[in-house]
Image (tube, helix red, strand yellow):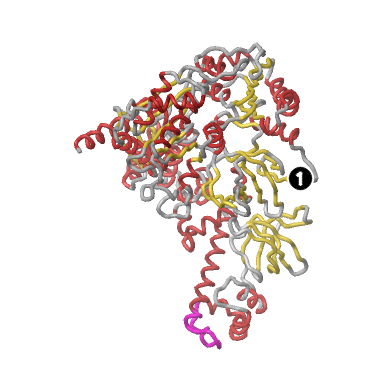
Amino acid sequence: MEIEGIVEEIIFRNEDNGYTVLILEGTNNVNTVVGNFLSVNVGENLLCKGEFKHTKYGMQFVMSSYESIVPKTELGIIRYLSSGLIKGVGEKTAEAIVNKFKKETLQIIEFNPELLTTVRGVSSKKAELISASLIEVKEMQNAMVFLQGYNISSNYALKIYDLYKNKTVELVSANPYRLVEDISGIGFLKADAIAKNMGISEKSAFRIRAGILHILSEASDKNGHTYMIKYNLVENVCKLLNFKPEEMEKEIVSVCESLEKENVLKIFWQDKTEIVMSTKMYSAEKYVASKLAILKNSAENLNFDIESEISLFEKVNKLFFHEDQKNAIKMAINSGVSVITGGPGTGKTTIISCVLEILKSLKNKVVLLAPTGRASKRLSESTGEEAKTIHRALEINFRSPTGMFVYNEQNPLPYDVVIVDEVSMVDITLMASLLKAIKRGSKLILVGDKDQLPSVGAGNVLADILSSGVIEKTELTKIYRQQNDSLIISNAHLINNGEMPTLDNNSKDFFFESKNSNEETFESIVSLMTERIENHFKIDVSKIQVLAPLKAGVCGIENLNFALQEKINPKSDKKAEIKVGQVVFRVGDKVMQTSNNYELTWQRETKKVNVVEDGSGVFNGDIGYIESIDLSSGEIEVLFEDGRRAKYPRSELSQLSLAYAITIHKSQGSEFDVVIIPAIAGPSIIFTRNLIYTAVTRAKKVVVIVGDKTALRRMIKNTYMAKRFTLLSNFLITENKKISLLFNDN
């Protein structure tokens, strides 16, 4: 449906995404129009396509696409020129110009701007400004029409035009695949559909280039690889582009070589295998390897005798360290880089506390870091010292052209010692950013559980560091922390050793409920989450978390979240809600951020009266609650568990998901009072020992496993670990040899 009219009033406009509510006056009617407009001003004549919908604000026209119509009457031209679209023209100037040139005004401005100087008050400079502004507006409007013609939303059209400006049509027409690299949110499939509509050849070098980068990106984002074997890359590109390998292999290899010349890719032989890496991943792994070797070799060889300090800590805290724990403490104090790894209850946190005490006595400035807000909060509570997320310590500075973070190689962190907990969660790019900010001569202490799932992001940092044999490490295996009648820790270790946990339900914190089908398991989980656990343990539902292996299926998080939302936060006339795709978000819902967004701003109240902390960046795995929903703009306000309050424009709501149930992968680094885990059958490449081990170790007070004991046993016996193709271990070995020689020579 189409409606045409003049913009009489702009009621609301979000400049971030272009979402606008305006009044459009037509010949015989006045309508409220809502949608994403690239640019709009009072007095502008618009032709809008869309449909009328009933909303809480009454009948509104929801715009799907629009174009600005050049006015045909003299009055229309005056209103158009004075609308604010055209720079240098107010109402009086517009009237004077139109009185002089009548209906030919717009043609005169565009093609013969020098004639404008015959109008009183219009200088040569002003005439040029008016003409340039009119041409720019026309180009912008043409670009909008062009982009919308290929089903590109107003929101993305806004981003595209903002980047390409008056070259939008030219650049996108020549190579729509460039959108994949230049515009966040436009993927290969979308660009491929646009290219197909434009008639671009399926064998175009642009298409092959985009296909190569897409496959490498997928390998990194979905599987954690930092490189691909060249043969496998070619094979996967052929599948994606529907090519026969024997016909297109040479062309694909040729485009890879071109990308290498552009420094987009690195192609080289490693262990008799030709591999392909993105330059970004190559640089990150190479830098991490080099900096770790520098920190290791540049540290002062002090060899402090800290026996008395350890004894004092034991006496004050009424505990005794095992010899392995003492060795870990000595190693951390005296090494440039060290790793302490072990499962739950093996004393990692107590060791950190002791190390902190000793370092403070040595007058060292120390910072405690963790990958997530939950992990840093837990670290702070257990040590009694302030802990920060890595992102917060580095301070995001997304507007800087020199880098994402305030602290970097040019501006290092002001600490003598950096301690990072839950390091198994840290991906290669974040580790590179952290190491860039650590000054030479500082100590780095890495703490984590090597048997946890690897990071969600690319790389296998902890495992690679351990396997390299370059960095000093202590592996803790003895359990020290376990209360009477508690089974969480001992059962976690049984699982990690490939043994079935104790499931007699005689403990106070570990329970198993046998069910005969996935449907029964589903019903039990919903009942446990919404009634039984809260009633029995007096633990609020907000402290209970369902951790499931899969997104889809009867016991997948999508199905569970739908059911749990209806029970915990049901539909109500008193609660605003908004639908995004197939998901309904409602005020009061528990939600999770599903990707890193470094630009989203937030505020947080501080302990100081009337002082609010401002910042930016929300990250994959952050959990919070919806506080408000603005139905007119589609904006959602979320209060995260660490006190950050962020407002999501409608264009970024796809980054949120309901979080009554989350995947086990997303739970890494978090800890919950109660976890509920479905034990169901599933693909062996997913349902593995370290998956169930990770889930169990997320619980602080209670674990409840629901489902089939045979499925649980099969998972515990399944030692399959999807291989991550990474090179950090190799790079670390070679970089350490090279750098140790340099330091020894000096």
Residue for point 37% across, 45% down: 264
Image spot of residue 297 (x, y percent): 29, 34
Main secondary structure of the magenta stretch:
helix
Query: In the drawing, does residue 191 fall left or right of residue 589?
Result: left
| Residue 55 lies in the magenta stretch | no
As rendered, which of 359 and 51 lies closer to the eye?
359
* Mark 1, secondary structure of its residue: loop
- Residue underneath mark 1: 575
Q: Residue furthest left?
A: 745
| Figure check: 548 above or below 211 | above
Image spot of residue 48 (x, y percent): 67, 60
Query: In the drawing, does residue 355 fall left or right of residue 90?
Result: left
Residue for point 69% across, 65% down: 4
Characterize the local packing of mark 1: few (<14), some (14-19) or many (20 or more) Cα atoms within 10 angstroms: few
| Figure check: 341 above or below 418 | above
As rendered, which of 294 and 164 lies closer to the eye?
294
Residue for point 56% across, 34% down: 381
| Figure check: 573 above or below 361 | below
Q: Image quadrant for the C terminus?
A: top left
Q: Image quadrant for the N terminus?
A: bottom right
User: The residue under label 1 is which amino acid type?
Assistant: Lys
Q: Image quadrant of residue 610?
A: bottom right
Asked whether residue 596 is in view, the answer is: yes
Image spot of residue 216 (x, y percent): 43, 38
Q: Image quadrant of residue 590?
A: top right
Q: Which residues are magenta?
A: 111-127
Q: Image quadrant of residue 564?
A: top right
